[in-house]
Amino acid sequence: MAERSPVPTALHQAPTGKPAATSPVKRAVPLLGLLAAFAVGLNLRPAITSVAAILQELTATAGLAPADVVLLSSLPVAAFGLSAPLIPLLTRRLGTELVLLASMLLLAGSLGMRALVPGLLLLCTFTAGVAIMGGSILMPQYLKELRASPRAVGIATTTFGVGAAAGASLTRPVVAAAGGNLSAGLGIWTVLAIAAAVLVWVRAASAGGAVPVREPGGGLPAPAAAAARGAARVFGPEGRRTAALIGAVFGLQAILYFAVSSWLPTIQDEAGIDRGTAANMLAWFSAVGFISTLLTPMLMAHLRLLRLAAALIGACVAFGFGWLALGGAAGSFGAITLLGFSQSAAFGLSMALIVAKTANGAIAGKLSAVSQGFGYVAAALGSALIGGLRTWTGSWNASLALMSLLALAMGVVAVLAVGREAISGAEHGREE
């Protein structure tokens, strides 16, 4: 059975049987939940794109070796994959909102320390990745619990791109305004993380607390326990196939997205484009995908259109990488425009699949953790491989050719995933 949402209804039954109107604060709880989700989404990319925007300056200032540069670019994504198994465990004990709150506070602390203590650049980049993973894994579960509409899911997913664009486009101006102080460009994003933490806390307090109530024996309440048992069966016979396909879609799009996010300014720099323009190109890569990220989840009710969209997304991403390799500086704007639009659509598709192909919030959280955990480990390895190929061959052409092949594979797997039934948590023939 589908899990009941923790979002309060607009009316509660009074003891007399007459409906009693809720307070304005209670009526605002669903809206607060969505605002909190949007704020969390805004924080899930600037920690990465802000570094990419000033990577050359950081390399020179911190005296990073080529291996350290590759490590810095892949550390956040490695943290995503390594921390993925911990998030569902913490969520079952503490509740979705409390773990979201802790994630945003950890992110704020990591970004602040990374800016203040240059020697902690690598360590705090890793812990920032852990915090980002908490928000990323819990986003589908949180939206499922809020009973968010496809439009709200699209908006929440779009905030990832908005944050990425902000990190890429605003970091260099902040550094310039601070007289060339790189720490200012890295530390400014602490404010955004604190704002998200405040919104999550306010929503949790308005809803009566984020920590799930325990039964006297220490277990979860009956509805939550039933949902957890359903989530535990995600890897039943049919659920295993669905989870594998969705995990592959998420992994392939993550490899491609984070390769671009980490290396695009460097690719542009080697093509003879000045660093300021290269950073703006990275911002454009994120911004041009706002519409496609918003619209893709809305196609979930139209499977034929979604299958067609999945195939086109893979083909467009593959073509975009070929264009970037062969078009040179003159063709880079068109290639990046196509890549930004189609890769954002791929991310929107992968997140929408996690929400749409699960019956309740607990199962969505489990599938989200598994898919994103696998996806981000693959992305970390892929980003390092792509950077390593550049070092080995002396050119980006081999890396871009590999990325084109991965994009075609992503399109095929996405078409297969769209046709799968939702994971119900009752794969052994009985409902909870």
Image (cartoon, rainbow, N blue to C red):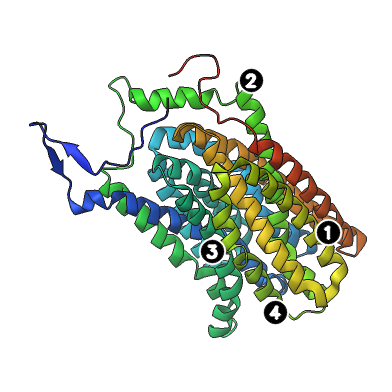
Camera-nearest residue between 46 and 319 = 319
Q: Give whichever of discs 1 and 4 has the lower sequence position.
A: 4
**Residue at the (57%, 79%) spot, across then down:** 175
Mark in front: 2 vs 4:
2
Measure the alpha-carbon separation of dots 3 and 2.
38 Å
Reading the image, the residue beneath label 2 is 237
Reading the image, the residue beneath label 4 is 277
Picture disc at residue 386: none
Tags 2 and 1 touching, CB below 8 Å? no
Residue 174 point in image, percent of width and height: 54, 79
Q: Give whichever of discs 3 and 2 has the lower sequence position.
A: 3
Mark in front: 2 vs 1:
2
Picture disc at residue 163: 3
The local secondary structure at tag 1 comes to helix
The N terminus lies in quadrant: top left
Horizontal side of 268 relative to 237 (left or right) equals: right
Measure the alpha-carbon separation of dots 1 and 3.
25 Å
Measure the alpha-carbon separation of dots 2 and 1.
37 Å
Residue 204 point in image, percent of width and height: 31, 47
Horizontal side of 314 relative to 418 (left or right) equals: right
**Residue type of the residue flagged with mark 4:** Thr
Picture disc at residue 400: 1
Q: Is residue 165 above or below residue 110?
A: below
The local secondary structure at tag 2 comes to helix
Tags 3 and 2 touching, CB below 8 Å? no
The local secondary structure at tag 3 comes to helix
Q: Is residue 387 above or below residue 413?
A: below
Measure the alpha-carbon separation of dots 1 and 4.
21 Å
Q: Give whichever of discs 1 and 3 has the lower sequence position.
A: 3
